[in-house]
Image (spheres, coloured by chain):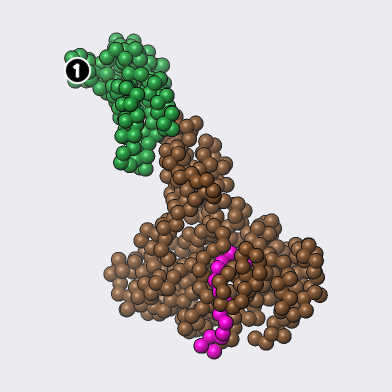
Chain colours: A green, B brown
Amino acid sequence: MVYQISIFLENRPNRLYSVTEALREGNINLRAAMIAEAGDFGIVRAIVDDPDMAFKILEEKNFSVKKTQVVGVEVPDGPGGLSDIARVLGSNDINIIYLYAFTVAGKNMAFLILKTDDNQKAKKIIKEQLGLRTISQRDINEL
Amino acid sequence: MDDDLRFKLLKKNLNYVYARVPHYRKAFKEAGITPDDIGGMKDLPKVPFLYKDDLRKYYPTGILAVEKREVVRYHASSGTTGKPTVVSYTQSDIRTWAQMVADCLRLVGINEGDIIQNSYGYGLFTGGLGLHYGAELLGASVVPTSGGNTQRQVQIMKDFGVQVLCCTPSYALYLAEVVERNGIDPHELPLKIGVFGAEPWSDSMRRIIEESLDIKAYDIYGMSELGGPGVGMECPNQDGLHVWDDKFIVEIIDPKTGEVLPEGEKGELVFTSLWKEASPVIRFRTGDITYLYEEGCECGSTDQRIGRLLGRTDDMLIIRGVNVFPSQIEHVLSKIKGVSGHYQIYVDRKGSLDEMEIFVEMTKDLFNDSMREILELKGQIEADMYAILNIKVKVTIVEPGKIPRSEGKAQRIVDKRVI
């Protein structure tokens, strides 16, 4: 499993900066980030090289922050990669709540971050039915 | 009205409440008096005050001076902590109240046969039914549109040839906007008079309403505890509100010391009813701030006259005619798990309608990465607020620590309205 940092933010200028600046000061490197918005507020979700430290820094700064487990999958960087995953999860009645992806320079792979209504089962199915490798936090740290 | 006659009425009412209402008997005893100690108008300040909080204790019948079966109607306004203040009426109370409202309407030249659109809300709120009964008694033709559905209100106003509009002043402004938006020329409407109350409004707002609807706009004063609308009314001179001498005794007091202030000085309005059978009020502290006129009106009336409202002694807000206490909001929030005690109420007027927004802090315990849960929480707070306040409130959830803290009394309310 991969640890994701989620932060509740008001949806207005400069709020994201307050988070990214805190992370910079703590020497935390972002691997991937996404913002989900719902009107007046949003949630920033990020994959970082040191989630424990990132959590600590943000909590000390009084943010509403949560560390959650998500599924990380290494997918060959080519057409249909995501479609296979969506298909097997769907046929096993697993709902994807959100997902985002990132690539790393020099590797021919994309990395998917998935939150589903049953992460354990999702991980198992992806491994068994697609033969794909799910990644751990250590993999993220070594990227 | 003759002072002796007025004093007789007062005395009759003091004896009445002392004999029939345990609350008054107890309060009089605590003050060390009986009605016999009141030998003239000058002795009225010896009588203890009645507070809104006192009335709240008598939920759900109200402070009752008659048998329950004699009550023919109940009205209620919001209380300070969620429980409403109930006011009850006997058959005779309803008749007298209607007569008072009819007299108010007649005072500004509204007559039998005039077509009145009553856009005050009908229900527990006294505005709708109060104006309705008074207008009917006058012999006017009432169109009971109640509040809301403004497009239809404007259509009815035009189609029915409405001559008199009754509603809150902010709703009148909104109606004026919709009239304009519909391409209707207000000069071509038969509308000539507006009777507006239930919230404070300024003379500049009056001018805007009068110009935009091409009418004369009059202020009507009332409060459910005093019976409802029709307690005070402007005459065509638009210079202070007349209060019928045989219905109420008005005092202005220093809200801090409780001392009676001379005419002309600003203070809290205190009313003693001389007509109410079911829920009589003796020296009721309204929380409204204004002053008493020294002289009779140019219109010839010698009845007591009060200035237009200048403010409140407490933190009560009036949003679209509805009384809102910050403590009610606090009460709702305190029942929701995970919500912090920090909140701020922001009131503004968008276009011409009051809007209330409540800022609530997201706590660390509450947040768990789920968008849905935050939206559900927001929806729940909004629904709970609506259930208690009966007005739509927007809830905005903010980051922890974002609501300003203060060392003294928290600044809970930001009121941006210009009235």
Quadrant of the rendered image containing residue B134: bottom right
- Give the residue displayed 31% in from the left and 34% down from the top: A17
Q: Is residue A110 left or right of residue B62?
A: left
Chain at numbered mark 1: A
Q: Start and end of the magenta stretch? A: B285-300
Name the main secondary structure of what is drawn in magenta: loop
Q: Which quadrant of the figure contains the N terminus of chain B?
A: bottom right
Q: Secondary structure at mark 1?
A: loop
Q: Position of residue A41 (x, y in %)?
A: 37, 39
> 10 Å neighbourhood of mark 1: few (<14), some, or many (≥20)?
few
Residue labelled with disc 1: A105
Vertical position of residue B153 compared to residue B315: above or below: below
Vertical position of residue B325 compared to residue B103: above or below: above
Q: Which quadrant of the figure contains the C terminus of chain B?
A: bottom left
**Residue B103 is at least partly visible in this image:** yes
Q: Position of residue B323 (x, y in %)?
A: 54, 59
Instruction: Please check the rendered image and state whether residue B291 is part of the magenta-colored stretch, yes or no.
Output: yes
